[in-house]
Image (cartoon, rainbow, N blue to C red):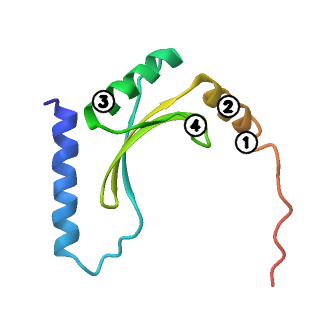
Amino acid sequence: MTKDRAAIITGLRDLADFLDAHPDIPITGCVPLYHFAARGTDADQRAEIERIANLLGTPVEAQTPYGHYVTTISFGPIQYRAVAITAAARARHDADDSYRGCIQPNPTPAT
């Protein structure tokens, strides 16, 4: 087991113990743990996600709204998601992000 992997597992256990000991702390929704495929060709990234899907025994979602290639396993509201971000999805994000800071909305009137 790698040092990073052991630290994540320990941290998850510590978080569960902490939340169990502090029932007044609110928690809602889903808790995802992400693994992102190493950058490379789209084919290399898809192969990594398919390998993980085989280990998990889960299907691969090839058509997410963002163009990602994903497999997920859930433990109640806790999810492990392995994700490949395709070159097209990265290019779309970069294009969208290129306008950041260029548009200034009018100030909202005080009421």
Label 2 crowd (10 A; few <14 / some 14-19 / many >=20): few
| Mark 2 or 3: the one toward you | 3
Residue at numbered disc 2: 94
Q: Secondary structure at mark 3?
A: helix
Which quadrant of the view contains residue 80?
top left
Alpha carbon of mark 4 to alpha carbon of mark 1: how far? 27 Å
Give the mark nearer the N terminus: 2 vs 3.
3
Which quadrant of the view contains residue 21?
bottom left
Alpha carbon of mark 4 to alpha carbon of mark 3: how far? 18 Å
Q: Position of residue 70 (x, y in %)?
A: 46, 37
Q: Are marks 2 and 1 in contact (CB under 8 Å)?
A: no
Residue at numbered disc 3: 54
Residue at numbered disc 1: 100
Which one is nearer the viewer's eye here, 37 or 8?
37
Quarter of the figure with the N terminus = top left
Label 4 crowd (10 A; few <14 / some 14-19 / many >=20): few
Residue at numbered disc 4: 63
37 relative to 16 in the view: left or right: right
Give the mark nearer the N terminus: 4 vs 3.
3
